[in-house]
Amino acid sequence: MSIIETITDVNNSFLSRRELTCNFAGLGGKLKSLEAVDMITKEFKLDGKVVIPMRLRTQVGKSLITGTFYVYDDEGLAKKHINPTIFSRLERTKAKLAEADAAAKEAEVADAPAEEAKEEAPAEVKADAPAEEAKKEEKTE
């Protein structure tokens, strides 16, 4: 895993939000915004709050990512303050992840009957084998 280093942690009372800036060591080019949100939520115990990734910037020549996150208590207030485009992008990404999970589950369900059919097929072949042996014995007699 990577190490999360807090650069700034400011409570902005005017906008009623917490502004976090953190470094993610060793994840240059591999970190996605929703994964970063999950990591921040676990690290700072922000369950039940709205965490919005504002910027993930990779440092040149290093495997270091600097991320800026806004933490709101109320989603309605967050939607007032932040550009709606950011929310639409987050919703689109979450929808794609949900579709991918659903497709993976469907593939697992579809593979299960195919495996059962493979297990049953050798039993049928074995049942036909004695009949073939009997035919061979009749021809040799």
Image: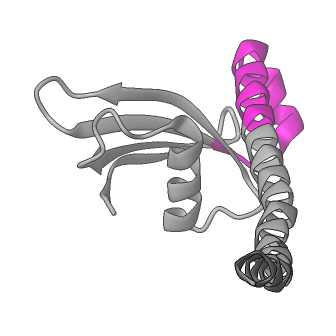
Residue 108 on image: x %, y %: 77, 59
User: Is most of the magenta stretch helix, strand or loop?
Assistant: helix
Q: In which quarter of the image is the C terminus?
A: bottom right
Q: Quadrant of the N terminus?
A: bottom left
Observer-nearest of 40 and 131: 131
The residue depicted at 47 percent of the width and 26 percent of the height is 55
Observer-nearest of 36 and 71: 36
Relative side of 56 to 140, left or right:
left
Toward which corner of the image does residue 86 lie, by quadrant?
top right
The residue depicted at 32 percent of the width and 32 percent of the height is 29
The residue depicted at 87 percent of the width and 64 percent of the height is 113
Residue closest to the far front = 141
Task: Give the answer, above or below, for where 105 lies relative to 68.
Answer: below
Q: Is residue 12 visible?
A: no
Toward which corner of the image does residue 135 lie, by quadrant?
bottom right
- The magenta stretch spans residue 84: yes
Residue 138 on image: x %, y %: 81, 81
Q: What colour scheme does the image use?
A: one colour
The residue depicted at 81 percent of the width and 86 percent of the height is 130
Relative side of 42 to 84, left or right:
left
Residue 99 on image: x %, y %: 81, 38
Task: Give the answer, above or below, for where 83 lies relative to 105.
Answer: above
Q: Is residue 64 visible?
A: yes
Task: Give the answer, above or below, for where 88 lies relative to 121.
Answer: above
**What range is drawn magenta here?**
71-96
